[in-house]
Image (cartoon, rainbow, N blue to C red):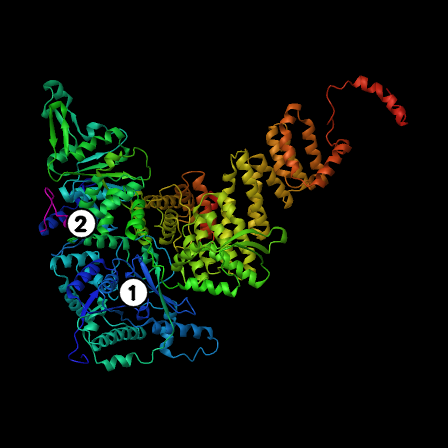
Amino acid sequence: MSPSASAAAPHIFGIRHHGPGSAQSLRKALEAMRPDILLVEGPPDAAEVLPLLAHPQMQPPVALLIYVPETPNLSVYYPFAIFSPEWQAIHYGLTSNIPVRFMDLPQAHQLAEAVQEARRRASQEEPPEAMPEEAQAQAPEQAEEPAATDDGQGEADPQPLPPDFQFPVPDPRADPLGFLAQAAGYSDGERWWEHMVEQRQNSAGVFEAILEAMTAARAEIPPLDDTAEARHEAQREAFMRKTIRQAQKEGFERIAVVCGAWHAPALADMPPAKDDNELLKGLPRTKVQATWIPWTYDRISSYSGYGAGVESPGWYHHLFTSALANHTPTEVAIHWMTRVARLLRSEGLDASSAHVIEAVRLAEALAALRDCPLPGLPEMNEAALGVFCFDTDLPLRLVHRQLIVGNVLGAVPDETPMVPLQQDLSREQKRLRLPPTSDWKDYDLDLRKPTDLERSHLLHRLLLLGVEWGTLQRSGGGKGTFHELWRVQWQPELAVRLIEAGRWGNTILAAATARTCDEATRADLSALGNLIEQVLLAHLPDAVPYITQCLENQAALTSDVVQMMRTLPGLANVLRYGDVRKTDTTAVGHVVNGLVVRICIGLPGACSSLNDEAAAAMFKLLVATNDVITMLQHPEHLAQWQAVLTQLANQQGMHGMIAGRCVRLLLDQRVFDHDEAARRMGLSLSLANEPAYAAAWIEGFIRGSGALLVHDTTLWQVLDGWVTALAGDTFTQILPLLRRTFATFEAPERRSLGERVRRGEARGVSPRPGMGTPSDLDEERARAVLPLVADLLGLPRPEV
Amino acid sequence: MTTLLREHAEQQFAEELAVLTEVDARSRPPSWKLSPWAVMTYLMGGKLDNGFTVSPKYIGNRRLIEIAIATLATDRALLLLGVPGTAKSWVSEHLAAAISGDSTMLVQGTAGTSEEAIRYGWNYARLLAEGPSPAALVPSPIMRAMEGGGIARLEELTRVPADVQDTLITVLSEKTLPIPELNSEMQARKGFNLIATANDRDRGVNDLSSALKRRFNTVVLPLPASAEEEVEIVRRRVESLGRMLELPAEPPALEEIRRVVQIFRELREGVTADGKTKLKSPSSTLSTAEAISVVNNGLSLAAHFGDGRMQSHDVASGLTGAVVKDPVQDRVVWLEYLETVVKERKGWKDLYRACREVV
């Protein structure tokens, strides 16, 4: 029992984390009770920054961040929204000038275990067997999710889930009130709360009822199987009781205790202080720091992987503001549906007031059919789906993103302590001797030097985080590919961006990785291709597999062959440089394989009926893709690619430029021999084809390199024959095209081709009889000249 | 024993409806034969307190049927949308049977459906003999439903020409059918409502005007949720069809059906069954009904031209035909699927080769 009989018994308010109903009732109850001290479930480590909560610049949603300064990756976030009961309680306490204390087990202890585990891992090779049994069972979980407490105040990687409007049965520990609500037949814990409060008309009574209900529930629900977890819970509750005893000792008389409903019975019934002190003995300890960072509703919702968060912060916000305005249940539904309608209208969808009326009626009818007195969010969603959406659920996804989750971003006061990300940056700046200055400064980074390489990584990572400290002037250039020229200038607003980026992680590396992965989920194929190159430049090895996965999904879905061809070279680079940077490239290899197969299947379709402009673009892609495929040296791909090229070369109605280049590529890869190439060239240049087509074919065939013509007389003759056979005005028409083609040759090649023409070599050995012979030649008269010519040459006279 | 080829729902399940009426003590909307709860039990099946078992009529998401029933209890009309073969008409028939005990007030929507079919026609002999009178009027099923406060059904709403569709607007918003010839009108009794069905795959036939759209709550009936469920539906159906057509072939191995259903589901959902690889979806519907026809087709090929056992080459042509409806786009999708998924799957080599021969 209580240590001293005279001590004031605390008032215990069991609440629902992030429950707007509890928040509302709690505030009222506190105002009625007028406590002289307030104890709130939360990390005592944050005592210093706690007063900032009532700062006028503080705008929820925000999160309290507790982290280990040396290893900022070990951290815990405690998100707060305007509708969080803890927020309302602390705000009340601070504004009415009474002491407010957090009373949970300090993160200094909880994180210390994670620190120990990290150290153990670092020296894992040496004594793997020496670990005590219990620590082994507990440690891995602690390290991955430093404080996955039953309140879910832990943060996992953002893993977007498909929007799912079903409310799962809540875990009784995480959301005991939701659990009770479901037992009472409500789809939504909040509506149950609201209903209960309304019927009772007396907020204070509610908390007594909750205490009773929870005492019963705790007796029903079996204890945790995992001894480590059970011990952890016992320690936390012991510390809470310890804090209460402390307050009693200090002589406070009206003690208000705000804690998760689950813990309420454990705090009401005080065991001897000795037992609690026994439990808390010898806990490890580490140095931690606390600060506030801006948060978003997006991240409070479980939608972004926040374990036991709330599914619908926007909906809760609506409930909370409705409660402030004293709306009746039907009004809540009407206001909500009106917001839905206005949102849909702003997106150009049909949503009239008549729709709103019908939707509210349907929601109420649905609730009645399900024996619920009030429509909850599921009923609202289903009614909206039936009334507004016609045959698609896309509008509802919009509603989910914009209203149910909401896109609110919080703000913190200027005097908030630095976030670890800022500290990490200043550490890096010192280490790499890259001081932030308000004047710009140019750096010429030689990527072969380790420091310069790391500087480049840092600047690229900051770019990915949206902190444009450095701008890349040019890379490579005259001095080779291992140079990067940066202009670096620090601006005050970059600090704000850095604070905003704080929600992505606590080190530049972690934050850049998280942010990039998030971006990847929304990017299209070519954006992903760019992203993966940036990721390589910024050296974010952990982001590569994720982006690769996204790429694979996008590649499968897109039917745009051009986009796939554009993405391929970047990926091939990853494959080529991956070995140097020691990233795992098997996944990338798989994507590349998939892309090549898809390009080969889709290319004939993508190349049909191209105009000149499109053909020129396709030409470039064709060359680039060919380079990649020949570079990769994958026999199966090569065979497939050559089959496609042959098909393109044979395809009727193909643009000349593409057909010509295909023949050329096949010639280069020795699939066609010279005779075959010459035959095809002859066919393309034959009179049946339009001269414009023939000129395009030639352009496609020889563009970029004239050496082939210099050395291959057969091809030269075919070309020469075609040019000489052109009629005068056609020749004038074709000339610019040919000129353009020949302009791409190197000067020496052009010269040697020109000399060849001047020598008239081609005509002398013309394989075609009669070529270059005008048909209107008068044989009689010509024969008359022959004797004189023979005389001049000193030959015997021919017989006439 | 009945000699009818097919009985109406209220005839076939008369016993279930009678027992439900007996035990149903909940409040009923005006003119409803059963309470919404009892209608729900009739549709989804269940065991009653007196031990009587109601067979499930619709196997699928319970919440959808709840929305449908709640809609009919308000005064908005219900529009059931879905690809062919998702039990739209089936659900509509059973809803009408359970709510008003009569599923026969039915208008079949076609391109030739006229306004008379929705409003009323005339008995011309009488009209000529006696002039316009209520006796010469031939009411449409919808008019009859209005008169009796029952549920009317309109099948394939999007096939009805747009101007005829709009006749429904007055009926659905004013709950009145004007009869200008007699200078009177028909006012619907409480309980009247309309269930329309429409096919959302061949969209754009006659899209609903937004004025009409507004009078409907929409429930989209999905394709079967799990592969097992779908395999079961296909198997039952193929076996009963095979019996009816007296095919001499052995009933197909479950393996082959499973493969066909898997291919259909993967292409339809655009992702492989293991959830690892995304795929393009073809333009074809790939409904369960088509899977049934592919298997059935393979079965008859095997029976008449093969050794009686359905093999991969027996289904290959049917599969290709079902998937490739657009010769250009779908062919690319199908080839990609064959090359990236079927080729690499263990034990599917035979199917890969058979399909490649056909494409």
In this rendering, do the residues under marks 2 and 1 share a single chain? no
Between circles 2 and 1, the one closer to the viewer is 1
At horizontal 57% and vertical 48% (from top left) the residue drawn is: A639
At horizontal 57% and vertical 46% (from top left) the residue drawn is: A624
Q: Nearer the viewer, residue A135 or A455?
A: A455
The magenta segment? B25-40
The amino acid type found where label 1 is placed reads Pro
- Residue A105 lies, in percent from the top left, at 30, 72
- Residue A758 lies, in percent from the top left, at 76, 32
> In the rendered structure, does residue A235 fall within the stretch colored magenta?
no
Q: Are marks 2 and 1 in contact (CB under 8 Å)?
A: no
Residue B192 sits above or below residue A626 on the image: above
Q: Nearer the viewer, residue A556 or A686?
A: A556
Q: Quadrant of the N terminus of chain B?
A: top left
- Residue A470 lies, in percent from the top left, at 50, 54
Q: Nearer the viewer, residue A177 or B163?
A: A177
Residue B201 sits above or below residue A94 on the image: above
The residue where tag 2 is placed is: B40
The amino acid type found where label 2 is placed reads Met
User: Is residue A373 shown left or right of residue A764?
Assistant: left
The residue where tag 1 is placed is: A51
